[in-house]
Amino acid sequence: MKKKIFLQIISSLIIFLIIFAGWFYLEFIFRVSQVPFDFNIYIEPNEGIVTQEKTITSSVIVFSDSEDSEEVEIYVSNCPKNTKCFLSIDNATPTYTSELIITPSKSTPPGTYPINIFAVGVGIRKNSIYYLTVEPFECVCTNWINKGCGGPCTSQMYMTRSCEPKDCDAESRCAYNSSCIKDFSIESIPTYSEVTNQEASFVINISSNNKFSGLVYLFDSGCPIGSICSYSINPVNIPSEGFATSLLSIQTALSTVIGNFTIKTTGISNTITQSTDSTITID
């Protein structure tokens, strides 16, 4: 009986030792096979081109396949002069992604810069490089757009355009000489003539600009002393988008001084005034 009990105790002890040894072996294998904490850092893309006063971004990826959880801090080094560099996340447990945001100023010298991104955690320090190329500031503007017609320069009469970057140049201006103002032009044909038999004549051509229409009154100045200057039609009625003419006739006298004379014809319609010159030679 005693022998039987003894054998049972021995058997139980052997089974316990086998189980304990198996547990110890499995724990040992687990600890030996466990990967120590480690990480890597990547930048995607790792290069970029940006204009002064613009912003460029890239993704900084801190990756780890370790089972342990440890915080890893990242920071920027070698940020170019007069440039803002920052990370959207600078401390977290891998795997995580942070956005690298870079904004060079107008005073950042153009060129290519290597920017270091360092990652530090549990005594491990790694880095990756981002290559930034800064190009000179460029102001690009659209063509001017006419926003009003006629009268003095008021809020209803100006020209506008848009520029990129915004406000890098003038984006509005007064349009006194706006291309859409109703107006007329006046021209002497020809501009020079010699007096023959005490007479000379010029065709005064008046054309409508931007659908101008109405009466244009003609006035002369500089008519030689002793001569008579007159217009065949005065005032001249100008049709919209058309033209009309009047003949300037100069009648000289025997007493008229010889020489070259310039006769100015001025056309007036309300507030609009235009003029042209006709030159004669009296021998």
Image: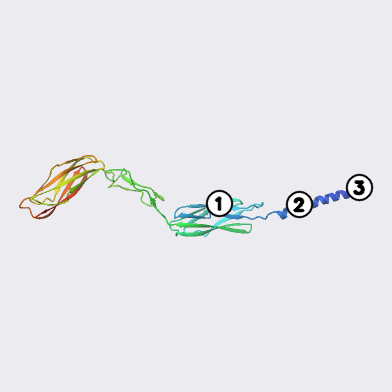
1 vs 2, front mark: 2
The residue indicated by pointer 1 is: 98
Q: To which residue does mark 2 refer? A: 26
Residue found at the far left of this picture: 254
Residue type highlighted by circle 1: Ser
What secondary structure is marked by label 2?
Answer: helix
Cα gap from disc 3 to disc 1, whole angstroms: 69 Å
Q: Which residue is tagged 3? A: 5
Q: Residue at x 85, y 51 (%)?
A: 14
Count of number-bearing discs: 3
Q: CA distance from mark 1 to mark 2?
A: 39 Å
Q: Earlier in the sequence, mark 3 or mark 1?
A: 3
| Residue 280 location (% of width, % of height) | 13, 52
- Residue farthest right in this picture: 1
> Sequence-wise, which precedes: disc 3 or disc 2?
3
Q: Residues within 10 Å of mark 2 (few under 14, many from 20)?
A: few
**Within-10-Å neighbours for mark 3: few <14, some 14–19, many 20+:** few
Q: Nearer the viewer, residue 202 or 8?
A: 202
Under tag 3, what secondary structure?
Answer: helix
Occupied quadrant, residue 110: bottom left
Q: How was this image coloured?
A: rainbow
Inspect the image, locate mark 2, and give the three-letter code of the amino acid beneath it.
Answer: Leu
Q: Which residue type carries mark 3?
A: Ile
Is there CB contact under 8 Å for labels 3 and 2? Answer: no
Please tell me which residue is depicted at 93% across the width and 49% down the height of the picture: 3
